[in-house]
Image: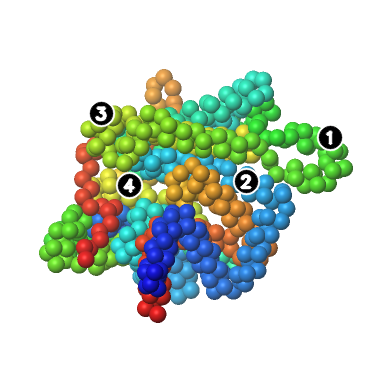
Amino acid sequence: MSIKAKLTNWSNSAKRYLDNTFVFTLIAIFIGLITGAIILAFAGFNPFESYWAMAVGIFSKPKYIIYTIIKATPIIITGYSVAFAFRTGLFNIGAEGQFIVGGIVAALAGYFLHLPPVIHAMVAFALAVGAAAAWGAAAGYLKARFGVHEVISTIMLNWIALYLSNYLVMSPAVKRAESEATHKILATARIDLFGVWKVSEQGMAWRMENRFFHDLLKPDINIGIIVAILLGVMIFLILKKTTLGYELRAVGFNKDAAENGGINVNRSFMSSMAIAGGLAGAAGALQVLGVSLECVNLSNMEGYGFDGIAVALIGGNTPAGCFLSGLLFGALKYGGGKLQSMMGAPREIISIVIGTILFFTAMPKLIRYFTSRINQKREEK
Amino acid sequence: MLSDIGFILGTTLMYATPLIYAALGAAISENSGVVNLGLEGMMYMGAFIGATVGYYLGNPWIAFLAAGAVGALVACLHGIACISFNADHVVSGIAINFFSIGFALFLCRIFFDGATMSLSLNFDQKMPRPFNGAFEPNSFGDLVFNQYATVYLAFILVLIVWYLLYKTRIGLRIRSVGEHPKAADTLGINVSRVRYLAVILSGVFAGFGGAAMSIAIVSRFSPTLISGHGFIAIAAMIFGKWKPQGAMLACLLFGSAKGFEIFLGASGLEIDLGIFKIGMSSQILAMLPYAVTLVVLVGFVGKAVAPSAVGLQYEKEA
């Protein structure tokens, strides 16, 4: 084989390798971190020390890793929600509102219902998912029946959900005295592990003797991440193995062709938005049942749904991708707080890094352009 | 009564203004075929730069122009991604939101000693009110027309953008690359260049919109200042069927719901339904603008008429 043929062969296989979205995403993450470092350096912070502080803050103790997972859980699931809608040709900006609906319903069901443990949590979770699914389906219905673009309707529904939730939180029957929050949910509805025991007298005594576990038990350990994994598997199965999933994907791929093929497009808008809404609601419910145990009066959006958009897009709109990108995002968010407390650098650098990663994942052509330029130069030599 | 109507009209105009700027930007960009979901982020940058330049230089007009310039700069990124490198418009727009909201807050902490809120502008550093003193205080005319200069400028710009899009050659080119880029290309129009122009203009407008918030309606930048206005402006533009005058009307509708919200909140009215009274809680009132928009959309929207090539990449054939 001539050298030239070898080179073309090499560059072809390199190109094939780089066509892989996963590799693109890794390159984009790398570029994102570099951009963050440059901006930190311009602002007068040592980028190496900053990233080191973040890495230490995320990985150095088991407790920190648990915090990272707790931070990542809700955005992994809102990521699923957005990704699922994307796969079926819809843009669910409404995950934010559906999250809020799920959260408030879980908080109400967790306080007002009186059921045995486990069942109470399951009922609260189911009610929350149902309500959020209806909230999502409303946007699907408006699109199917009145042709209202889901981007507009879900933006409006987000704000309506926010104020509705605030209205409920602040109403006399729901509001906890001397707070701007709902009553804490009952112990029977909680999905955290050892949550009650660890602050009991007995638990505290045991923790004093076992220092390692004392530390480990500080975060609100809960089963949320397990539910997140199960939900991811469920979405994968729905999309790949069921008729419903096939139909939804067909509509997402080509609406007109799907309609010609006998698929009821309007109904699929509604089922897709209902599933997406239910997922975001599940995230809200898990957050309330496992971490916050209450809903507060919100002055502004918390951003779980919007973070979910980034998680879905970086994760290539697949469940596994969302899981990984959600963990990355959770780690960065948690590490961003550490960066601010240890280095005094603004934590918003994380949004800049995430934005840059997203920006470059949007442009595989740019990365390909650079790699082909490098190949060209090699060939010239 | 008359002064109540004046109050509502006045607040309507004030709150519609930032939306009108951003919605005009959205209209220009989408007519050229580029979806710009990054408006929210561009508004954040505009609001921050407006408030900061205003604070340090003291001149509201320089601040306003600087806000437009930074909007243009951010829009350039969107253009590079979507036009030159075939990026997905939605992904790039969302990326730009994360990036520029983060960047605005990052810079704010650096310029204002770790705070995410800029220091307040003095009264003479804010946008002037050209008709201040022309009417009797608190008269109908005063309540409606004693507005910041940015309010008047917004309406003038609606006229200019309408003229630009529908009565000039460049407007025809913008619309043609949004409708059928290949045909436009065949006729010798440089599709990329026209789209760049449109996207950068949309950034300028979004920057103006942000500054219309931070140096006129309020007198500082804060992290919750924009909170969703960029998206509402996009909704208004779609609602207004991709036309500047339609977008303006949609923004006015949203603004008037906001005006009612503030009016009812201030006067503490109860709605008397005969059998029972509904006390207007502030949360229910705050829902009003969004609920009204949704109801009107359901009631009055016809088939949406987006430019055919909107959101699609155009690659010139070699």
- On whether disc 2 and disc 1 are found on a single subunit, the reply is yes
Residue A201 horizontal/vertical position (percent)? 84, 35
C-alpha separation, residue under disc 2 versus residue under disc 1: 28 Å
Q: Are marks 1 and 4 in contact (CB under 8 Å)?
A: no
* Badge 1: chain ID: A
- Identify the residue shown where x is 53% and y is 45%: A323
Q: Is residue A193 left or right of residue A347?
A: right
- On whether disc 2 and disc 4 are found on a single subunit, the reply is no
Residue B200 horizontal/vertical position (percent)? 31, 65
Residue type at tag 2: Ile
Q: Residue furthest front?
A: A1
C-alpha separation, residue under disc 1 versus residue under disc 4: 55 Å
Q: Earlier in the sequence, mark 3 or mark 1?
A: 1
Q: Residues within 10 Å of mark 1 (few under 14, many from 20)?
A: few
Q: Are marks 3 and 1 in contact (CB under 8 Å)?
A: no
The answer to which of B1 and B302 lies nearer the viewer is B302
Residue at mark 1? A201
In the rendered image, which quarter is residue B175 located in? Answer: bottom left
Residue at mark 3? A262
The answer to which of B134 and B267 lies nearer the viewer is B267
- Comparing labels 2 and 1, the label whose residue is closer to the camera: 2
Residue at mark 4? B235
Residue type at tag 3: Gly
* Badge 2: chain ID: A
